[in-house]
Image: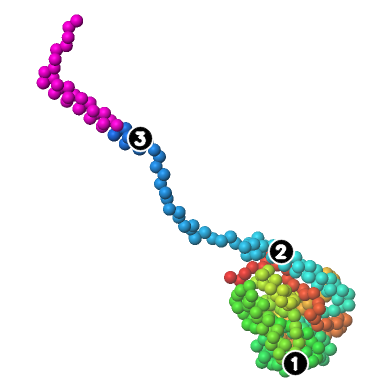
Amino acid sequence: MMRGMPLNRKGKITIFLMLTLILSLLVGWGTIVKANSGKNKPTIALIPAQPLSSSFKPKQSFAASDLNHSIQNKKELSREQAVNQKAQQQLEKDHKHKVIYLTFDDGPSLEADQLLDVLDHYNAKATFFMLGPNMESRKHVVKRMVKEDFGVGLHGITHDAHKIYSSKAAPLKEMTQDQKILKEIAGVQSELVRLPYGSIPYLTVDMRSLLNKNGFKTWDWNIDSQDWELKDQRFVQNVIQDIQNLEKTGMAPVILMHDKATTVHYLPQLLDYLNKHGYQTKKLTNAMPPLTFQCEGRCHSMH
């Protein structure tokens, strides 16, 4: 068996270098593996909490909702319809006794005293829906109306549609002010109101509800004399014709007229007709259910 040859100096150096190279490779590989092992682990980033946005709208209360508004409107319309049915029943009873209700708007005018004289001459009763400023200008007439047992009601302050129908609360405001003026002058509390131009179309359901909740009774009419348009005795013939037509329905007339010179001048012709045909005139009272035009889809805001 042959022995190996001993290494010379050159061989030893070669082996040393090879071992050094191998050791270096092993150390380097371990470093790479260690570094890569950290890259494979998931990183969890801590994100600071964000404040809640303040741009969202708070939930609307039911009371202010469109649904509740619709429900309240239906309730008001149902209430008004029920009252109007009672009014018609009352007018049917009055018809059997040939009762007629004469009503005059816009006064007291300069002719108001003369108007009262004519009514007194015929022993006729009537109801006056008066404007606040006119009452303040002719306080003695208002006191005379109350003293002589005529009906007194409210017609507002401005008689300006753009003002009295300007907002939900505007009709109530004018009627409350008018009521106060009447109370201060004559010492009576009237709940009777008539809106300028009637309650159709600008007296909305909201306005009607407010007036009712504050104790007011809204009166319209079933005969329009048209004395505001017919400046002579034609308005008398118009009223007579409407009375005859209404007679067929079994309803007592509630006649709209105005406190003005031409109406006062031709009124005796109408009163002569009523006396001749056996009619009796009465005044409207707080206790009576009011005859009010029904909305039936016709009521809307002026704006």
204 and 260: which one is in front? 204
Q: CA distance from mark 3 to mark 2?
A: 76 Å
Relative image position of residue 289 (x, y in whole percent): 80, 74
Quarter of image, res 68: bottom right
Amino acid, disc 2 = Lys
Crowd class of label 3 (few under 14; some 14 to 19; many from 20; radius 10 Å): few
Residue position for label 2 = 74
Magenta residues span 1-30
Compared with 184, 243 (above or below) is above
Residue position for label 1 = 143
Residue position for label 3 = 37
- Report if residue 6 lies within the magenta region: yes
Compared with 50, 25 (above or below) is above
Quarter of the rendering occupied by the N terminus? top left
Q: Residue at x 26, y 31 (%)?
A: 27
39 and 262: which one is in front? 39
- Report if residue 238 lies within the magenta region: no
Q: Residue at x 71, y 76 (%)?
A: 214
Q: For residue 298, say whether it is visible.
A: yes
**Magenta: main secondary structure:** helix
Camera-nearest label, 2 or 1 = 2
- Structure colour scheme: rainbow
- Could you tell me if the residues under marks 2 and 1 are in contact, i.e. CB atoms within 8 Å? no
- Could you tell me if the residues under marks 3 and 2 are in contact, i.e. CB atoms within 8 Å? no
Camera-nearest label, 3 or 1 = 3
SS category of the residue bearing label 2: helix
